[in-house]
Structure formats: C-alpha cells, structure tokens
Image: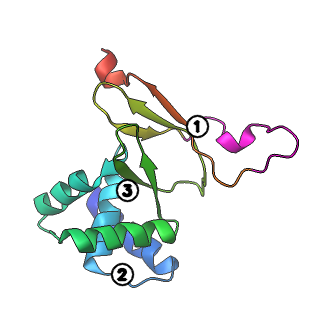
C-alpha cells in the first residue's frame, strides 16, 4: 500500500472512530493535515485541496476544520501574526509547545518537549488553557 493510500485509510478511520461521517471534504482536509510537516493556515489548506482536485468552498472548509478540532483530530494554533493554523493531534497531546519561525512564519508542533502543563503554578492558581509559543528561526531559514 502506498503512502497516499495509507493516508486515505487513516483519515477515514480517524473520522469514523471519532463518530463522524466520512465526507469527502473531511477526509481530504484531514489527509492534507496528516501529510503536512508543519501547521497550515486556511489558505494553504485551500490551495492543497485545489491541487488535489478536491476544492471546497471556504464555509465548508471552516466547518470541516472546526469539526476536526471539536473532535480532537486537529488543533488550532494562532501565531503572533494572528493567523490560525491547523495541525493534526498526535499521541493524544492536548497541550504542547509550538515554534514559529520569525522569517518564514511557519508554525511547528514541538511534541518531543515537555508539555506546558509540566510547569508548576503558584498556590491558588488553576490553569484552564495553556499555550506556549517559542519564536526564532527554523532549520530551513537558519542555513
């Protein structure tokens, strides 16, 4: 089975396991996110859909992304440029650090670092949501 076939099967399985209907739009968007090396914004996902011959209108794309996020198949990250980017959820990580390149603006999940929840808060503080964004230069832009 080739990589694309595995991606199609994995995306369909993930959607079904989350209790959702495996629509062509959901499957195509999840396949794109699964194949991405970094988090993608709406425009990048839309372009990838067109290249694959699976275009969908913006409203459908927004709904699909929100469905994927609400069913914990994807998460969304906002960079300092206030642009939402999306990536798949790996290893059931709820909160993990992210890195945004100040040169190319790409956002990467840093899944091998300790989660932000490992931080200890002073007595009386209760976290409800944690985000950690590290900024700097990615390996591609650094060279």
Image check: 53 left or right of 74? Answer: left
Residue 29 is situated, as x and y percent measured from the top left of the image, at 30, 65
**Residue that label 1 marks:** 112
Residue 76 is situated, as x and y percent measured from the top left of the image, at 44, 54
**Residue that label 2 marks:** 22
Quick one: label 2 or label 3, which is nearer the N terminus? Answer: 2
Residue 82 sits above or below residue 71 on the image: above
Q: Which residue is pictured at 32% across the width and 49% down the height?
A: 40
Q: Which residue is pictured at 60% across the width and 53% down the height?
A: 93
Quadrant in which the C terminus appears: top left
Image quadrant in which you'd find residue 56: bottom left
The answer, for residue 100, to whether it is visible in the render is: yes
- The stretch drawn in magenta includes residue 122: yes
Residue 129 is situated, as x and y percent measured from the top left of the image, at 63, 52
Residue 125 sits above or below residue 119 on the image: below
Within 10 angstroms of label 2, few (less than 14), some, or many (20 or more) residues?
some
Quick one: label 1 or label 3, which is nearer the N terminus? Answer: 3
Quick one: label 1 or label 2, which is nearer the N terminus? Answer: 2
Q: Which residue is pictured at 29% across the width and 58% down the height?
A: 32
Q: Secondary structure at mark 3?
A: helix
The numbered disc on residue 34 is 3
Image check: 2 left or right of 84? Answer: left
Quadrant in which the N terminus appears: bottom left
Range drawn in magenta: 111-126
Q: Secondary structure at mark 1?
A: loop
Q: Which residue is pictured at 51% across the width and 72% down the height?
A: 71
Mark 1 and mark 2: Cα distance apart in space = 31 Å
């Amino acid at each position: 089975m080739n990589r694309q076939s595995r991606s199609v099967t994995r995306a369909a399985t993930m959607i079904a396991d989350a209790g959702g209907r495996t629509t062509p739009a959901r499957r195509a968007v999840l396949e794109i996110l699964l194949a991405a090396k970094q988090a993608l914004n709406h425009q990048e996902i839309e372009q990838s859909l067109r290249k694959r011959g699976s275009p969908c209108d913006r409203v459908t794309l927004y709904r699909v992304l929100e469905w994927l996020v609400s069913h914990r198949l994807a998460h969304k990250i906002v960079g300092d440029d206030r642009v939402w980017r999306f990536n798949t959820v790996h290893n059931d990580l709820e909160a993990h650090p992210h890195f945004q390149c100040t040169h190319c603006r790409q956002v990467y999940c840093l899944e091998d670092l300790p989660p932000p929840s490992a931080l200890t808060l002073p007595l009386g503080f209760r976290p409800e949501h944690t985000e950690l964004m590290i900024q700097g230069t990615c390996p591609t832009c650094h060279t």
